[in-house]
Image (tube, rainbow, N blue to C red):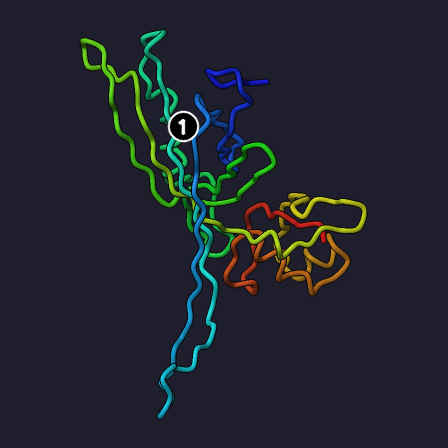
């Protein structure tokens, strides 16, 4: 099993397009999670407080900083962090089943029992130590990940089943999401869960990319 520099089990960020994993060299000292909701206020004549109506929830965001250090072996620290930058770039080998356009990959943050399916919304890197020739040896990377799947959409089943168990299928030509949901789950009405699990905004569009099928 991989270990961090301190001998701990490392956290990971996984590229879900190709399953390439970046093991953390040092586990983060902390990370933060935030979420906001969108509310609409309507003035009420003669009242001190407006009427408030919930509109929609915003995606959870996870922010953390990772440190990488190759001073001991003198190699370019970017050999580690370039994996993260690739997760920010458009992957021409994959297309969104919704837009039929290529996009950066979805990723998964994993550390201990915490697993978070997301996209990398922002990434910044600061180099702080260099060799005599300018080769960077130490860097801090600030990452913001944005949620793309609400695990509460897929409740756990009696007997302790995981809420995120899933299978992956390749749609056949002409298949709609409701057809796929019927074949895979026994209920065509589960197409909404399939659409949510794959970040599909238009469930009526025929998918072409592999689909994650949650086990409801």
Residue farthest toward the bottom in the current orientation of the protein: 46
Q: Nearer the viewer, residue 94 or 21?
A: 21
In which quadrant will I find the N terminus?
top right
Q: Position of residue 83 (x, y in %)?
A: 40, 28
Residue at x 47% of width, y 67% of height: 56
| Residue at image mark 1 | 83
- Per the image, label 1 sits on a secondary structure element best described as helix
Residue at x 46% of width, y 71% of height: 55
- The answer to whether 194 appears left or right of 3 in the picture is right
Q: Position of residue 62 (x, y in %)?
A: 44, 44
In which quadrant will I find the C terminus?
bottom right
Q: Is residue 99 above or below residue 89?
A: below
Q: Position of residue 164 (x, y in %)?
A: 65, 46
Q: Is residue 43 above or below residue 149?
A: below
Quarter of image, res 29: top left
Q: Position of residue 163 (x, y in %)?
A: 67, 48
């Amino acid at each position: 099993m991989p270990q961090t520099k301190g001998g701990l089990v490392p956290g990971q960020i996984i590229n879900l397009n190709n399953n390439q994993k970046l093991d953390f060299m040092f586990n983060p000292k902390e990370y933060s999670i935030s979420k906001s909701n969108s509310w609409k206020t309507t003035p009420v004549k003669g009242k001190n407080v407006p009427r408030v109506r919930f509109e929609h929830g915003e995606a959870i965001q996870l922010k953390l900083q990772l440190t990488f250090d190759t001073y001991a072996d003198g190699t370019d620290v970017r050999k580690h962090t370039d994996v993260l930058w690739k997760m920010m770039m458009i992957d021409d080998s994959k297309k969104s089943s919704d837009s039929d356009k290529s996009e950066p990959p979805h990723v998964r943050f994993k550390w201990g029992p915490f697993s978070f399916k997301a996209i990398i919304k922002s990434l910044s890197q600061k180099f702080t130590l260099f060799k005599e020739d300018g080769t960077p040896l130490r860097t801090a990377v600030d990452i913001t990940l944005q949620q793309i799947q609400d695990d509460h959409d897929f409740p756990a089943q009696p007997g302790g089943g995981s809420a995120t168990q899933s299978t992956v299928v390749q749609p056949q030509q002409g298949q709609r999401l409701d057809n796929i949901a019927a074949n895979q789950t026994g209920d065509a009405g589960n197409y909404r869960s399939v659409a949510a699990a794959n970040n599909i905004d238009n469930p009526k569009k025929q998918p072409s990319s592999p689909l994650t099928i949650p086990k409801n």
